[in-house]
Image: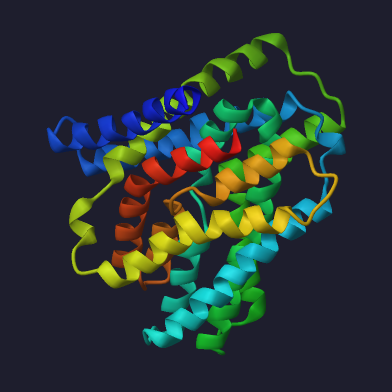
Amino acid sequence: MSDVLNLTIPMFSLIGIGYLLKKIRFMSGQDGTVLSKFAFYILLPPLMFTSILSGDASKSLNVNFIFSYEIITISIFVLTYLLGLLIKLKTMEKAIFGLNAAYPNYGYIGVPLCILAFGAEAAIPLALILLADTFVLLTTLIVYKLTENRKISLRELSKEVVKRFIYNPLMMSVFVAFIFSIADINIITAIDRTLTIIAASATAVALIALGVSLNLTSIRNQRGVLFLITLIKLVVHPILIFIIFQFQNGIDPIWVKTAIVCASLPVAANVFVLANYYKTFSNESAAAITITTIASSITVTITLLLTL
């Protein structure tokens, strides 16, 4: 119990510090945007890169592990599609609704939390989940968009997915780390130490940036949708991941624990970016990110208590 609290209290306290800094006007929303970009593009990639290199990525491809996790991701999209029909959401609204329910905050919380909780061994399963989940979720958005507007070509939307992969620094850090590990490329000591120093600051900056970006005013008038997103994202998602891995054999327990904790994370900040890009469900997404981040201080702690 104390080990888990010693892990989660500092992390969520940093989010609270970020929110407090905005409330006392020490930092503005614009400052938070800059800090978020700095964390996402500069600090978090070295953390993921160095963590993957500390393991053996050449023996990391576990198709059964990836397939099991993504079955749940697709199931959540099916569930949210049916719920979207009941509450009369439009096509792309259902897509972003599903994204809110299925896409965890890997970057700002997942990467530092899993590495702190389970050590560098968690980096490889985390990288596989990040790659597979992002591919499945972005591909699902393409399907929804094609359904909504048949004038948009599959080729055009496929190019958009590829572009989002290329411009995602976490994705690129994962790819480069796997190449370095498989090719057994040694990093110059000075560069390695520089990356280690940068990585050490990633957790604090990312969590404070997340706190600055929270917006409690966005929660108003969104109670019904927020309840569904919070329930599915923080409760249903990790339970389904736990259940499916009970039927799998030969998977490292650390990998299973990493998958469960990932599923228990709040809505990813990137969901709001995608909602803005598609010009739909953006207010609801902003509210969902805020409320699930706050609620996850309890649910993530419970999940860690059950997995550690």
* Residue 148 image position (x, y, % from top left): 50, 87
Q: Relative to 242, say whether 298 is above or below.
A: above
The answer to whether residue 99 is left or right of residue 14 is: right
- Up-down: is 28 above or below 79? above
> Where's residue 164, x and y in %?
57, 57
Residue found farthest to the top: 190
Residue drawn at the location 83% of the way across and 45% of the way down: 61
Give the quarter of the figure containing the C terminus: top right
The reply to whether residue 42 is visible in this rendering is: yes
Do we see residue 176 in this rendering? no
Q: Is residue 16 above or below residue 188?
A: below
Q: Residue at x 41, y 77 (%)?
A: 93
Which residue corresponds to the image point at 68% horizontal and 39% vertical from the top-left?
174
> Within the image, what quadrant is residue 301 found in?
top left
Q: Left of 23 or right of it: where is 66? A: right
In front here: 90 or 297? 297
Residue name at image x 78 percent, y 38 percent: 252
User: Based on the displayed image, in which of its 4 quarters is residue 78 positioned?
Assistant: bottom right
* Coordinates of residue 75 in the picture (x, y in percent): 62, 70
Colour scheme of the picture? rainbow
Location of residue 238 in the rendering, given as x and y in whole percent from the top left corner? 56, 54
**Which residue occupies the extreme left position in the image?**
24
- Residue in front for this viewpoint, 248 or 101: 248
Relative to 126, residue 76 above or below: below
How many numbered discs?
0
Q: Is residue 205 left or right of residue 76?
A: left
